[in-house]
Image: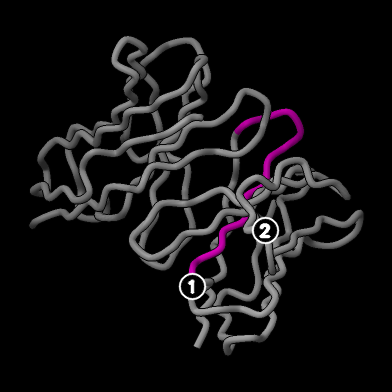
């Protein structure tokens, strides 16, 4: 069975600092990987996705993520965090033929002024 | 192109009542997924439907929960005889045929008193 682990429940960074959110997955084949952001009381917005090809994926809002097969990781990064990035971030892994996604428990990001 | 729509956005029920949650997928999307998010947790897959068919209901509780996606109209998630433990945010997502990217609605927040 596939699983997703986000080791950090809560991260606090200063505005302007760099950010890395960790995500590890367990899956038998090459997975489809996603990062979503959720603001309080809102739905999920897709930041970026990896299906195949270049292992460094660019997303919206200045985010990027790198797929590392050897480490079973898909960490999310941003070089300079803005106060508006404060939210909850979810990593997810999907099947190959449009089916359910398995989500991590999320990482809450707090941005200090 | 309107996004995924869910209604109601908030729903309050007393124990023993029925809850009906509606999801209208994005135009042209024939795949619908329901997820549940308990407080402080990630999203947990419930059911995956195509028009008039349940494809995967492995995440649905065995009793009281049912889902449908009729030929015409929205997808419905129905919870009979609600209990306090059903209080959660219920998210619907849709995807185009044969594609893996899921687009999420804003969610329905169910509160059982």
* Image x and y of residue B22, in percent: 71, 67
Which stretch did the figure color magenta?
B88-100
- The colour scheme is one colour
Q: Chain of mark 2?
A: B
* Image x and y of residue A68, in percent: 33, 15
Going from N to C along the chain, the mark reached first, 2 or 1, is 2
Q: Residue at x 64, y 86 (%)?
A: B16
Residue at which label 2 appears: B62
- Residue B53 left/right relative to B19: right
Q: Residue at x 76, y 49 (%)?
A: B27
Q: Chain of mark 1?
A: B
Residue at which label 1 appears: B85
| Residue A85 seen in render | yes
Q: Residue at x 75, y 64 (%)?
A: B76
- Work out how far the residue at label 2 is from the one at label 1, CA to CA, in angstroms: 15 Å
Q: Residues within 10 Å of mark 2 (few under 14, many from 20)?
A: few
Q: Main secondary structure of the magenta part?
A: strand
How many marks the image carries: the answer is 2
Instruction: Place residue B105 in its image quadrant.
Output: bottom right
- Residue B41 left/right relative to B6: left
The image shows residue A80, relative to residue A107, as above or below, that is above
Please identify, in this view, whether the residue under mark 2 or under mark 1 is nearer the observer.
2
In depth, the one of B25 and A71 nearer the eye is A71
């Amino acid at each position: 069975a596939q699983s997703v682990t986000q080791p950090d429940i809560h991260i606090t960074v200063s505005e302007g600092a760099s950010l890395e959110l960790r995500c590890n997955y367990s899956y038998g084949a090459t997975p489809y990987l996603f990062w979503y952001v959720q603001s309080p009381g809102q739905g999920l917005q897709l930041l970026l996705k990896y299906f195949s090809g270049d292992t460094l994926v660019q997303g919206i809002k200045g985010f990027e993520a790198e797929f590392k097969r050897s480490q079973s990781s898909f960490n999310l990064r941003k070089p300079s965090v803005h106060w508006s990035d404060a939210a909850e971030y979810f990593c997810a892994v999907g099947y190959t033929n449009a089916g359910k996604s398995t989500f991590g428990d999320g990482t809450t990001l707090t941005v200090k002024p | 192109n309107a996004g995924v729509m869910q209604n109601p956005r908030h729903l309050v029920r007393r124990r023993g009542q029925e809850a009906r949650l509606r999801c209208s997928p994005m135009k042209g999307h024939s795949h619908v997924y329901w997820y549940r998010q308990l407080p402080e947790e990630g999203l947990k897959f419930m059911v995956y439907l195509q028009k008039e068919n349940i494809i995967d209901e492995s995440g649905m509780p065995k009793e009281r929960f049912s889902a449908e996606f009729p030929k015409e109209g929205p997808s419905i998630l129905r919870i009979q005889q609600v209990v306090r433990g059903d209080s959660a945010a219920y998210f619907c997502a849709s995807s185009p045929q044969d594609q893996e990217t899921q687009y999420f609605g804003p969610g329905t927040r169910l509160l059982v008193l």
